[in-house]
Image (cartoon, grey):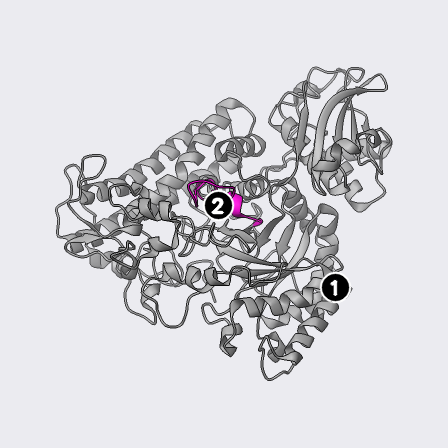
Amino acid sequence: MSGAVLALLTCTGTVRAEDGYALWMRYTPLESALVADGRRPLPEVQAPDQTATQRAARTELVRGLAGLPGNALLAQSTVATLPALVLGTPQSSTLIAPLRKEMDSLGEEGYLLRRTRMQGRDVVLVAAPRDIGVLYGVFHLLRLLQTGASLDALALRESPRMRLRVLNHWDNLDGHVERGYAGRSLWDWQTLPEWHDPRYTDYARANASVGINGTVLNNVNASAQSLAPDYLDKAATLADMFRPYGIRVYLSVRFSAPIELGGLNAADPLDADVQRWWQHKADEIYARIPDFGGFLVKANSEGQPGPQDYGRSHAEGANLLADALAPHGGVVMWRAFVYAHDVPADRATQAYTEFAGLDGAFRPNVILQVKNGPIDFQPREPFHPLFGAMPRTPLMMEVQITKEYLGFATHLVYLGPLYEEVLQSRTHARGQRATVAQSLTGMAGVANIGTDRTWSGSHFDPANWYAFGRLAWNPYQSARDIAADWAAMTFSPDPEVVQPIVGMMMDSREAAVNYMTPLGLHHLMARGHHYGPGPWVDGGPRADWTSVYYHRADRDGIGFDRTARGSNAVGQYAPEVAARYGDLARVPEPLLLWFHHVPWDHRMASGRTLWDELVGRYSQGVRQVKAMQATWERLEGRVDAQRHAQVTAFLRIQLREAQWWRDASVAYFQSVSGRPLPAGEIAPPHPLAWYQHLQFPSAPGDGR
């Protein structure tokens, strides 16, 4: 190994600040791997370094080899017994070249990991058809070493199941992050393009480590200025820094940009001048960013301009941009999150109503980006009815990584189970596209990444970034297994640390559902900033921005009737799914009040009435947070003091706010139902009016 590599190993293995910045890429020194002279036995690394991606792979590997907890490769080894680590492609390594045919089926991003013997030596191979696959393979190998996995019989083949694995940043050009709870925007537009902040490279490393291959730099509520030449120069600098890590840059675009930037009188997609403007803009972008990914578009939703302003369809609007990008290989990600100025009978039905009839009308390079559920990133929703309903249109699922409706950054809510629940939902009883995962071309995650040292606002929120990447790569993985990997890499591979942390994580999403929106309730948060409970919210400019619109509680019962007798939202699902959701006796209880208006005395599976069950679920959510607190307290001394203290404080916040959600919600629904509290349930400490008059003008992450 060269002196330069040894120097890199030395400097990367010394300082280990436990402030969360390293994320899951903590390559902590392993004391048991030291030899008598105080130096760690290090394997030989044979890796090309002729391209930026090759250098990134080599650098990451030697960074990791500085010391890994539970390292099965280094522990109890001598220099003589260590296998050599061989990285490369058939083009860059003569040792890898004989595997060319074996790797043909891996695709452009796949890789294989193998322990074998070559030329009389024990070797660990990281081989791939292209450099980016080698980098992904290096991160996979480091994950195995970080989690203490045995490499004795290493033989893995990996390829992504989805083509697009993209983060959506809701960052504005002024540095504000809409629905962001981790500080200011990571992108410092003021100092770009001159200043290449090293944090941009660390961001790219983190994304590559879980296979994320795209990033949308700016808010879907876009400013036309993001397409101005000076901002394109800034975006090009970020693209240059991300390119070695396999990450393409995308931009959210404002549909009316030809008016605001180009001086045209309209943005009609069938207008020849508008078409030429977008073609020239695409040429301008690709001259700066040759591998530019494409556009993300929010149109005719929440006041954003779009093709319907000119009597055109979503397909005609998307195809306008797709035609401009097609010569360069770019794509259009067109969001299906739409609702009209006139409030429909059921907002949950509108996206399907507007898009299902357009199946097959989009250009091949248009991908319809559909939220995981039909409303808006609620703690629990049924899967969106568009999944499985548009077989001739590429679809990608949009999920939130930031927790707009799940307690912001301070609540410990692991979203892996939410993602897994939706991905595994059956859209049809049988067939090749019978699950949501099988209907997808890609996944998009609305990021909660900012200038906070933890990147995401807390020490547990990066788990959702990590889980998103892992499930976008392979949607058939287990959220529990992913949590175990993350916990081992982030805190310690010690099973006595991993197991309780995974238990907390796996219970956390259901706890939040219980203390916020149990039994299929949804959209119960306060108005605007979405901080805290607001089941009483009514009035204002739109009924479907209120809580009472969704829960429809009255003296007789609660819930939104979406059966054939009500809004018939169930009719947008396949017949066998509709039959299950529409039947009060068969609908899953977690979705009961999403699809049915149910009497308060309806008998639940527990034997309790609906009213007693509802109050009990709210209280259960509080108890679950207390259990999380107790688990975390027992980990004191096993987790470094700095991170343990912050998580402890955040769990106190979560318990206080879970109790607030429970008390405010119970007080409100009791005022509507007129029923006594179940035996053993404690009355809210304040009257309903006290909760209703609370104000939070400085709640973080509000939209504007």
Residue at the spot 21% in from the left edge and 56% down from the top edge: 553
Amino acid carrying label 1: it is: Tyr
Q: Nearer the viewer, mark 1 or mark 2?
A: 2
Magenta part of the chain: 420-442
Location of mark 2 (residue) = 436
566 relative position to 195: left or right: left
Amino acid carrying label 2: it is: Val
Would you say the magenta stretch is mainly helix, strand or loop?
A: loop
Rendered location of residue 200, percent (x, y): 68, 51
Residue at the spot 71% in from the left edge and 50% down from the top edge: 198
Rendered location of residue 226, percent (x, y): 63, 68
Rendered location of residue 45, percent (x, y): 80, 29
Query: Is residue 532 placed above or below 432 in the rendered structure?
Result: below
Camera-side residue of 638 and 390: 390
Location of mark 1 (residue) = 286
Tell me if residue 432 is in the magenta stretch: yes
458 relative position to 608: left or right: right
- Per the image, label 1 sits on a secondary structure element best described as helix
Residue 704 appears in the rendering: yes
CA–CA distance in space, label 1 to label 2: 34 Å
677 relative position to 296: left or right: left
Query: Is residue 228 placed above or below 421 in the rendered structure?
Result: below
Q: Quadrant of residue 143?
A: top right
Camera-side residue of 130 and 303: 130
- Per the image, label 2 sits on a secondary structure element best described as loop
